[in-house]
Image (cartoon, helix red, strand yellow):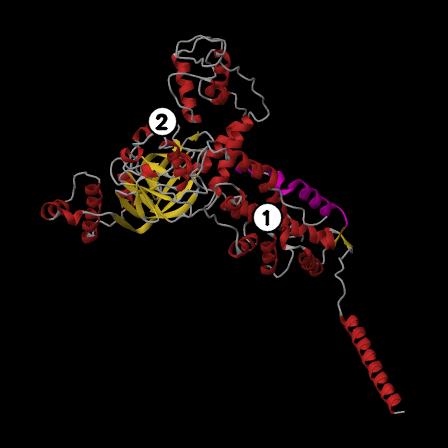
Amino acid sequence: MVQLSKLKYYSMKRLKFFLLSGLLAVLMVSCWPGPKRHDLAQTTFPDIDEPRLDSSVYYLLDEIPDSVHPHVHWLKQMYAANHYRAFWMTPERIKKCDTLLMFVNRSEEHGIPYTCFISDSLRYTIHQIKTERTSYYELAKADIQLTFTYFSYASALIYGIVHPRSELPNYHFKTALPDSIFALKTTKHYHGSLTSFLIAMQNKGEAYKQLQQERKYWLQFRHDSFPVISMLPYKKTLRAGDKSILIPQIIRRLKITGNIASTFPDTLTVLNKPLFDALMALRKKAGIDADAEVGNATLRMLNRQPKEWIKIVDVNMERMRWQTIVNGKKKYVRVNVADMTLKAWRADSVALFSKVCVGNPAINKTPFLDSRISEVVLNPQWSVPSSIVVKEISKKVVTDTAYFRRNQMKVYHKGSEVDPSKIDWTKVSKSNQPYRLVQDAGEINSLGRIKFNFANPYGVYLHDTNAKRAFGRYNRAVSHGCVRVEKPLDLALFCLPDIAENQQKQLADRSIQADKIRHAIHLPVISEEGKRLLAADSLRLKSNRLWISPSVPLLVEYLTCFTNEKGKPVYRPDVYRMDEPLDSLLRLKFTLPVLFR
């Protein structure tokens, strides 16, 4: 009986538990708002219930995953800053749609295909909304897609479309990206003059404007297909005064490029001086070595179709939109790897121009990076990179036993100097390279007399060189990745701090630093204090390195179309073949997704 009573007691307790649980579940279901339902009620455009539209916008935003596109996160921030009110789909604000789509349809002026922004489908949607009965659900979808387009278009103008560091090979510098400040800015300016804001977002640099004009010029031939000029026979070239059946075609092409007057007779068959000079001018603009002979490289350039010229301009306009560390700096250094030149800038003026040698594309490309020049090393030693030891030196020394003595190199193993003649260099490989090779400082050193250090994980630097003849070459992509500078002394003096004329002590200190550099590379000192120190105690002028404070911003970049010292667009060969990947991203990859189907 006791067992039965206990059983009844526990059964009743369990029953009460299940009843209470069921009641609680019913209460929860009755209080739960349920799944979001889209407002499918129809309305005509002038009679929109704005709170109802805002509610549809709020619920729709919550359905968009942030993973759809990087800008979705900022899209939601814009609506939050706007108190989740619709931006466009109200009678008093619908006119702003036309303003936005007008700008988007002109995006190709910036080398950005307007199809990226699906503006045609948006224009059709807006027309439907204005002329037909539409649900609040459709109105909310259109509003969100328009805001998405607005933010993405403004972002493309100021930051560019492609993020080079994450989407392109060999790019290692940081670029600015849209952030919460920009999201709030786009929200704020939407409520002001949308036209003024979108104009303000455009690149105002003179170089950028010149590229826009260059694009506009080639655009007039966009749908033309130029007849192909035949190539010359192997090793055959044309010189001034030569006859050729190709001359009339060359003349017609020079008329199109604007390098020769439209009235110039195109029946000539002789490469006379005016024609030769016009070809030289175009070769210089196109980045072809303007020697005394016209070869197939020039003919291939002449055969370039208008769409190819436009593509080169477009990818470089995108590069100009990338905001890097040198933007807004008063003093900085830029190396253009494609042009193989260095420019040191003070504000908007070039203080120093120098040829450079850059990485050989077949061996080791120079990385595109940003950093700050923090140190000048005088008479540096060279610790030979292991890759050079394996790929080059180990092969040379097998037959050239005097290599180490002639190049003043020492070999170390586990910290101790060893005799290189007792090493079996044929066994050195990528997986078996235990030696450290160091070249003594001096004129024969591969780094020359001056080296410029800047923080980077790639082991590259700017430096002088003992191989000066390379600067006489047109193609100077000959290094192992570092940048050789033709004018290292001028660059070192530029890196010293700029001092105001009334700061006498600081000016004197700077003069001593400049004399230390000159003295180290066996040049006469200039300042009176430097001369006094040299006469009294020359050791006080001796220095192995100078710290640069403040450090000087450095950008190593890649531009195959830019403006020259006269402000005119010029082109350079795409030695690293970087234009095509960027063009593919601009034209194929970048298309704003349709957020709703």
Of circles 1 and 2, which is in front?
2
Compared across the picture, whether 334 is left or right of 66 comes to left
Read off the residue under disc 2: 473
Read off the residue under disc 1: 150
**Place of residue 574 in the rendered image (x, y in percent of width and height, measured from the top left):** 47, 31
**Place of residue 60 in the rendered image (x, y in percent of width and height, measured from the top left):** 69, 56
Q: Amino acid at mark 1?
A: Tyr
280 versus 124 height, above or below: above
Element carrying mark 1: helix
Q: Could you classify mark 1 by the number of other residues whose Cα lies within 10 Å: few (under 14), some (14-19), or many (20 or more)?
A: many
Compared across the picture, whether 203 is left or right of 74 comes to left
Residue at x 15% of width, y 46% of height: 530
131 falls in the magenta region = yes
Q: CA distance from mark 1 to mark 2?
A: 48 Å
Element carrying mark 2: loop
Compared across the picture, whether 502 is left or right of 214 comes to left
